[in-house]
Image: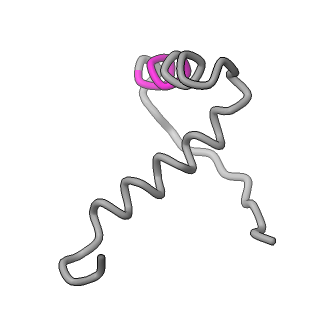
Amino acid sequence: MMIKRKTSFMVNDDLWREWTLFVVKKTGFARKLSEELEKALREYMERRKPDGKR
């Protein structure tokens, strides 16, 4: 079982609204914000791995 860590971060208000709308349009639920953010972070890191690490 993966342990979840509660965290907070600063983000531009307009970007957060855009993210919220994106997630609601994609999933139909605002309560999926954290889940979708975690997926986006994992995808970003996978795409940006240093050369030879993929």
Say which quadrant the C terminus sits in.
Answer: bottom left
Lateral position of residue 41 relative to residue 45, left or right: right
| Image: 37 above or below 30 | below
Q: Where is residue 3 in the image (x, y as percent from the top left)?
A: 78, 67
Task: Look at 46% across and 34% down and name the residue there.
Answer: 11
- The span picked out in magenta is 15-20
> Which residue is at the front of the view, 17 or 22?
22
Location of residue 49 in the rendering, given as x and y in whole percent from the top left corner: 29, 70
Residue at the right extreme of this rendering: 1
In the rendered image, which quarter contains the N terminus? bottom right
Q: Above or below — where is 22 with respect to 52? A: above
Residue drawn at point x = 63 percent, y = 33 percent: 33
Q: Is residue 1 magenta?
A: no
Q: In this view, does 33 lie to the left or right of 31?
A: left
Magenta stretch, main secondary structure, is helix
Residue located at (47% from left, 46% from top):
40
Residue 35 location, quadrant: top right
Check the image and name the residue furthest to the left: 51
Residue 20 image offset from top left, x and y in percent: 55, 21
Q: In which quarter of the image is residue 52?
A: bottom left
Q: In this view, does 16 lie to the left or right of 7?
A: left
> In terms of image quadrants, where is residue 25?
top right
Residue 19 falls within the magenta-colored stretch = yes
User: Where 11 sits versus 2, above or below?
Assistant: above
Q: Is residue 48 above or below residue 40?
A: below
User: Residue at 68% across / 22% down in the picture?
Assistant: 30
